[in-house]
Amino acid sequence: MFVEVETLGDPVENRLVEARGQQAANPSLCHDGAAMLAPPSAAILAGGKARRFGGRDKSRLVIEGRSIIVRQTEALQRVAHDIFIVGPQADLYADLGLPVYADLLPGFGALGGLFTALEVAREDLVLAVACDLPFLDAGLLVRLVERAAGHDGAWIATARGTEPLIACYRRDVRTRVLDRLRRGALKAADLGATLDLAVVSADEVAEFGPIDRLLANVNTPEDFARIESTR
């Protein structure tokens, strides 16, 4: 199977630069021109080993003409102004112009990446997304931020289960995340046992588009082929 991957030397689309300029001029802008009182930080978690994809950098897979990480950055720029990547090597993402932070606790999987994101973020609320989600929707991200009010955060729960890596968390939960790491409780999907996470339901997700598309992730070459086949 041919898999198109963005090369590191490729220029990022001009619309990314334009979006940064628009967002810098008016950081309160979010989806469809709505305004949030306190835009969140946003972390793209890119520290995984991608063993089921042969170690390939999944964030650079090209879907519908743009790499996943460029697609994500475009969506996140409509919602957040402190956007960064948690990943192993800053030079891998130099073309994006985003800060890159190495895992503070390497070897602890997605939960370790989330802890790093919460530790380095500048805002009280932090959107956390896995780097293999190609169809982020800014409106859905705003809904997560709004739903987090009065809670430790908000995540999506559907028949697929909970979605800890397209979610919004308060920075101050990082001590409890760290406690889970120390206890070896590393499954991110179990965070609801420790944190008060408000739920965005399947019906709410469907307001923004087909659930299977919005929550699709690329764990394997088969996942990638399935996404490509629906174009």
Image (spheres, rainbow, N blue to C red):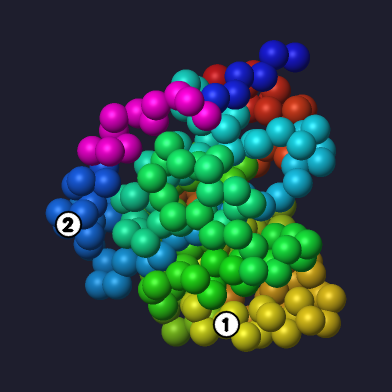
**145 left or right of 131 in image:** left
Q: Residue visible at 42% across and 41% down?
A: 96
Quarter of the image with the C terminus in it: top right
Could you say which quadrant of the image residue 155 lies in?
Answer: bottom right
Q: Is residue 150 above or below residue 225?
A: below
Give the SS element for disc 1. Answer: helix
Q: Are marks 1 and 2 in contact (CB under 8 Å)?
A: no
Q: Amino acid at mark 1?
A: Val
Q: Mark 2 belongs to which amino acid?
A: Asn
- State the residue in front, 1 or 24: 24
Q: Residue at x 45, y 24 (%)?
A: 10
Q: Nearer the viewer, residue 71 or 9?
A: 9
Number of other residues with Cα within 10 Å of mark 2, as a class: few under 14, some 14 to 19, many 20 or more: few
Q: Quadrant of the N terminus?
A: top right
Q: Is residue 147 left or right of residue 211?
A: left
- Residue 79, above or below 222: below
Above or below residue 195? Residue 13 is: above
Indicate whether residue 12 is drawn in magenta: yes
Query: How much space separates mark 1 and mark 2, taking CA atoms?
Result: 29 Å
Q: Which residues are magenta?
A: 8-18
Q: Mark 1 = which residue?
A: 173
Residue 76, numbered circle: none
Number of marks in the image? 2
131 to 114, vertically: above or below: above
